[in-house]
């Protein structure tokens, strides 16, 4: 599918990318969603917590929801997504990545943008234990990169997995990092860095031979975090090796199921390499929508349902 024109046209205030981003992240509230938690054990001895919500009527369709950097399954962009899908006849399985459910995970490793082995574990768990004939995956930001990498990196995708949606996707992780380290994004980057470092404190106590207090004190930027922790904990040489190997951009031309990416042109978290125009124009399975406005995971919409949430539901409904 080619790149296609977006119809998204928000109110004036939400045309400002920073306003849209901050409103979505800090002020939006979602009420009336009941979630039930399930813990699954992973092959390496760790665990994932899954927060389920359900359609009003029995259904054979489920969407797996993947959050962004330092998110969780209770963030409004996840609960809003779950609510929109539930109302449209889909159950929703919102994944909390390792260490993101309110409890430190068991291993020194945690989660990262390319950890598709954990997504595959969730998919296999659902196929082996549940009743669904149709599985869809919607990833937001970091979760979008993971979902698209999963679909294109060469594994055999189960027949039940019908489609992928990525929202505000950092398709080129190094490009996104460079964007986040610009002065205009200082507060966002500082907030991410502080959250990540805070989580390393209990890790250091659990694994003092793997990381020291001095290591943690040397983390001044997001790249430092990836050099000092992400790369060491997950088998990469350094941050740049991690970005190179885990960016979904290189895998997009191999996606063989319907996939949709929605990323706003005024998303200050994304560099120009994060907009995969060439891949969308050459892979008939990949659609790319680049609204002029929306910020990072913003896309304000009426009745507290965002444009990207409604668009994702419509895309999944039309896949088959």
Image: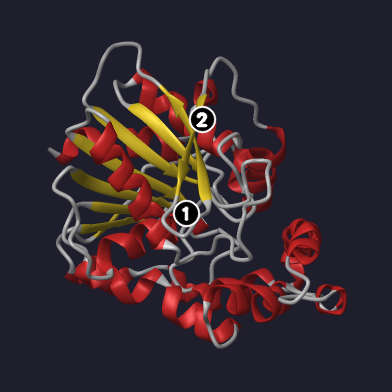
Q: In the rendering, at what x and y percent does residue 307 appear?
A: 44, 36
Q: Quadrant of residue 256?
A: bottom left
Instruction: Tell us which disc is closer to us: 1 or 2.
Output: 1
Between the C-alphas of marks 1 and 2, the distance is: 16 Å
In the image, residue 187 above or below residue 163: below
Q: Where, quadrant-wise, is the C terminus in this rendering? A: top left
Q: Quadrant of residue 249?
A: bottom left
Q: Residue at x 30, y 52 (%)?
A: 260
Q: Is residue 315 visible?
A: no
Decide if residue 176 is on the left or right side of residue 188.
Answer: left
Instruction: Quickly name the residue at label 1.
Output: 143
In the image, residue 55 above or below residue 279: above
Q: Where, quadrant-wise, is the N terminus in this rendering? A: bottom left
Instruction: Quickly name the residue at label 2.
Output: 80
Q: Which mark is residue 282?
A: none
Q: Residue at x 54, y 73 (%)?
A: 234
Q: In the rendering, at what x and y percent does residue 143 appear?
A: 47, 54
Dot 1: element? helix
Q: Residues within 10 Å of mark 1 (few under 14, many from 20)?
A: many
How is the protein colored in the picture? secondary structure
In the image, residue 175 above or below residue 14: below
Dot 2: element? helix
Q: In the rendering, at what x and y percent does residue 98 appear?
A: 57, 52
Decide if residue 155 is on the left or right side of residue 230.
Answer: left
- For marks 1 and 2 on the same chain, the one whose residue lies earlier in the sequence: 2
Q: In the rendering, at what x and y percent does residue 235 appear?
A: 52, 79
């Amino acid at each position: 599918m080619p790149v296609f024109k977006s119809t998204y046209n928000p109110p004036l205030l939400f045309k400002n990318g920073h306003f849209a981003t901050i409103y979505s992240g800090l002020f939006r509230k979602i009420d009336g969603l009941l979630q039930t938690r399930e813990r699954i054990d992973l092959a390496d001895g760790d665990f994932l917590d899954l927060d389920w919500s359900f359609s009003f009527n029995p259904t054979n369709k489920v969407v797996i929801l993947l959050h962004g950097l330092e998110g969780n399954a209770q963030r409004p962009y996840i609960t809003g997504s779950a609510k929109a899908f539930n109302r449209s006849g889909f159950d929703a399985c919102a994944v909390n990545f390792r260490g993101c459910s309110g409890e430190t995970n068991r291993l020194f490793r945690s989660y990262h943008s390319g950890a598709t082995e954990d997504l595959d574990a969730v998919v296999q768990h659902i196929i082996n234990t549940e009743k669904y004939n149709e599985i869809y995956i919607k990833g937001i930001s970091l979760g979008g990169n993971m979902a698209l990498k999963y679909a294109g990196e060469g594994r055999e995708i189960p027949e039940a997995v019908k489609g992928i949606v990525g929202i505000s996707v950092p398709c080129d992780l190094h490009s996104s990092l460079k964007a986040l380290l610009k002065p205009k994004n200082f507060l966002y980057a500082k907030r991410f860095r502080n959250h990540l470092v805070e989580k390393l404190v209990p890790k250091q106590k659990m694994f003092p031979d793997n990381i020291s207090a001095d290591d943690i004190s040397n983390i001044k930027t997001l790249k430092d975090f990836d050099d000092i922790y992400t790369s060491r904990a997950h088998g990469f040489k350094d941050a740049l090796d991690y970005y190179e190997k885990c960016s979904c951009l290189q895998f997009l031309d191999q996606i063989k199921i319907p996939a949709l990416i929605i990323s706003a042109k005024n998303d200050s978290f994304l560099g120009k390499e994060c907009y995969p125009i060439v891949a969308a124009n050459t892979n008939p399975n990949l659609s790319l929508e680049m609204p002029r406005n929306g910020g990072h995971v913003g896309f304000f919409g009426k009745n507290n349902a965002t444009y990207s949430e409604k668009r994702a539901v419509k895309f999944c409904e039309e896949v088959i």
